[in-house]
Image (tube, rainbow, N blue to C red):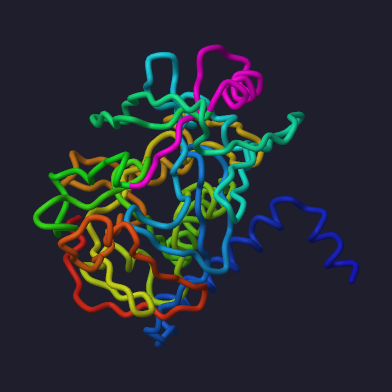
């Protein structure tokens, strides 16, 4: 017992123990794990782009992705989107979506504010996100704007909502889209960067943390990477090879590897950011560059759902399905990782 206490008091020894434990995990993952079964272990939505996520046991699907996922967006006075890239403290806004679709703004040292999506006084504005202009987005009103500006200590920011594809339309990038949602049109997406879903394996994060532990760098939580679907089982980075997968009874296409930015260096609890030269980007640069995307750092796979094809847009909008924690993932076809 004395030896154990001395060991626990020695920080270097604790780091050594952590490294040994990670080593055991990697040996088990790469060499002794014969199971090929992959399951959904965690599900998340992020109602306001760039803000905190909500962990779910099951999530409804719709024509733009998971229901309520990235359907709200903060924009500046010129209508340009704002995320943690510019304002890391957005991670501490923890929105709630009620059953009737009402958004509740909640943040540290702030009052809870209920935000109805549309009412008689709603104004509609056009906003830009990356290269896209999204027209006729319902502005969420002055109260929501004041709440956000007070929290961020800024001026001119507005909160907008994405209505259904019948009224507010945004399509996935043509460059990467591999299937059509409706009569040759590109898939509908929300205010996500590019695609409906992001999938990431727990084994991939464990492998990254193993590499960080070897360098005596702090290990990271899954929330750094803001996935929608987290898997367990299989091998590290197996999601890189997903071409066509089935989750439960629903089909998805692996469109491209997810490129990574400075947001991965933001502690999602404290909003502290280590910057573009910090971890995990520093480690990623040694082994996770994709030559097919201008050598950008990648981690996780962007998915697009294979929705039923309808001749009537209103029927496509009414599509719904449910993904649950514990659903089995079947890999129908694979692709080469590309790097």
In the image, taking residue 326 as reference, residue 170 lies left or right, namely left
Vertical placement of residue 261 versus 3, above or below: above
Magenta span: 141-164
Residue 225 appears at what percent x and percent y?
Answer: 46, 49
Report the front residue among 160 and 317: 317
Q: In which quarter of the image is the N terminus?
A: bottom right
Residue under the point 45% across and 36% down: 161
Residue 316 appears at what percent x and percent y?
Answer: 27, 60
Can you tell which quarter of the image residue 178 is in?
Answer: bottom left
In the image, taking residue 73 as reference, residue 114 lies left or right, namely right
Residue 65 appears at what percent x and percent y?
Answer: 37, 56
Vertical placement of residue 178 versus 279, above or below: below
Residue 300 appears at what percent x and percent y?
Answer: 36, 56
Q: In which quarter of the image is the C terminus?
A: bottom left
Residue under the point 39% across and 26% down: 124
How many callouts does the rendering have?
Answer: 0
Report the front residue among 286 and 119: 119
Residue under the point 29% across and 30% down: 135
In the image, taking residue 145 as reference, residue 338 lies left or right, namely left
Report the front residue among 149 and 18: 149
Residue under the point 59% across and 30% down: 89
Task: Find the residue positioned furthest to the front.
Answer: 120
Task: Find the residue positioned furthest to the right.
Answer: 2
């Amino acid at each position: 017992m004395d030896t154990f206490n001395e060991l626990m008091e020695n920080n270097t020894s604790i780091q050594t123990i952590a490294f040994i434990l990670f080593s055991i995990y990697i040996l088990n993952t790469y060499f002794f794990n014969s199971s090929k079964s992959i399951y959904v272990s965690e599900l998340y939505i992020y109602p306001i782009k760039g803000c905190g996520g909500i962990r779910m046991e099951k999530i409804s699907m719709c024509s733009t992705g998971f229901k309520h996922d990235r359907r709200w967006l903060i924009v500046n006075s010129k209508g340009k989107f704002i995320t943690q890239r510019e304002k890391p403290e957005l991670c501490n806004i923890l929105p709630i979506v009620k059953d009737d679709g009402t958004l509740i703004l909640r943040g540290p040292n702030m009052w809870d504010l209920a935000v109805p999506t549309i009412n008689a006084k709603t104004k509609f504005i056009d906003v830009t996100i990356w290269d896209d202009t999204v027209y006729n987005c319902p502005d969420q009103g002055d109260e929501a704007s004041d709440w956000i500006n007070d929290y961020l200590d800024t001026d001119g920011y507005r909160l907008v909502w994405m209505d259904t594809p019948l009224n507010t339309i945004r399509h996935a990038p043509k460059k990467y889209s591999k299937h059509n949602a409706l009569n040759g049109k590109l898939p509908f997406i929300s205010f996500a960067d590019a695609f409906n879903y992001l999938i990431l394996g727990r084994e991939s994060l464990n492998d990254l943390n193993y590499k960080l532990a070897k360098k005596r760098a702090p290990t990271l939580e899954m929330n750094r990477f803001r996935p929608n679907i987290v898997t367990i089982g299989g091998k590290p980075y197996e999601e890189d090879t997903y071409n066509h997968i089935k989750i439960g009874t629903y089909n998805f296409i692996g469109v491209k590897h997810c490129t990574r930015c400075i947001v991965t260096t933001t502690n999602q609890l404290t909003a502290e950011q280590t910057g573009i030269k910090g971890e995990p980007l520093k480690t990623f640069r040694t082994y996770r560059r994709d030559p097919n995307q201008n050598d950008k750092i990648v981690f996780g796979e962007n998915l697009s759902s294979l929705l039923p094809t309808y001749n009537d847009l209103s029927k496509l909008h009414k599509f719904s399905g449910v993904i649950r924690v514990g659903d089995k993932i079947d890999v129908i076809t694979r692709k080469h990782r590309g790097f």
